[in-house]
Image (spheres, rainbow, N blue to C red):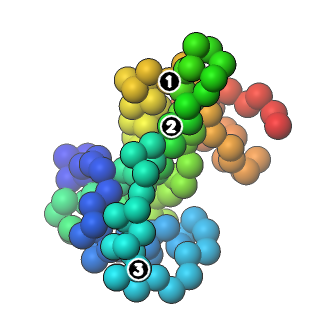
Amino acid sequence: MTNFKIRPLEITDYDKGYLNLLSQLTTVGEIHKDKFEENFNKLPECHKLFVIEDVARNTIVSMGTLIIETKFIHNCGKVGHIEDIVVDRNIRGKGLGKMIVNYLSKLSNDLGCYKCVLNCKNDFIEFYKKCNFNNNGC
């Protein structure tokens, strides 16, 4: 997997298929480049968007988001929330989903979060168990 690189989302990723990949996960709508750049520049520090780039093809093939929530409980602790995990449907099964989830989970820990959580559809519970997450229900 030497052609793949995990890195923070960059403003130039609009041209590398970021929104096309995101549309494989959910409805995106028509977002033109200027709107993408405006929204990118408004992202708060607590939103950590990461991508996996296929360096050889100069395209985004996987992505995920870590949102850091500051709490009053646990001595003003922090909780990491993993969201928006998607791998390009054309290259699924190569471990990229697990790679991005594990990266975000470790980042959550490195940033001092006392726990890291995510919500997913029932179809994906087994995948997230393989990434060391537990099913704690609603």
The kind of residue on which mark 1 rests is: Cys
The kind of residue on which mark 3 rests is: Lys
User: In the figure, is residue 10 to the left or right of 26?
Assistant: left
- Looking at the rendered structure, the secondary structure element under dot 2 is strand
The answer for how far apart the CA atoms under marks 2 and 3 are is 24 Å
Q: Which residue is mark 2?
A: 68
The answer for how far apart the CA atoms under marks 3 and 1 are is 32 Å
User: Is disc 1 in contact with disc 2, using a CB cutoff of under 8 Å?
Assistant: yes
> Is residue 131 placed above or below 83 in the rendered structure?
above
Return the x and y of residue 51 as percentages of the image width and height.
35, 54
Looking at the image, can residue 128 be seen? no
Mark identifier at residue 35: 3
Residue 133 image-quadrant placement: top right
Return the x and y of residue 66 as percentages of the image width and height.
48, 43
The kind of residue on which mark 2 rests is: Ile
**Quadrant of the snapshot with the C terminus:** top right
> Which circle's residue, 1 or 2, is located before the other in the chain?
2
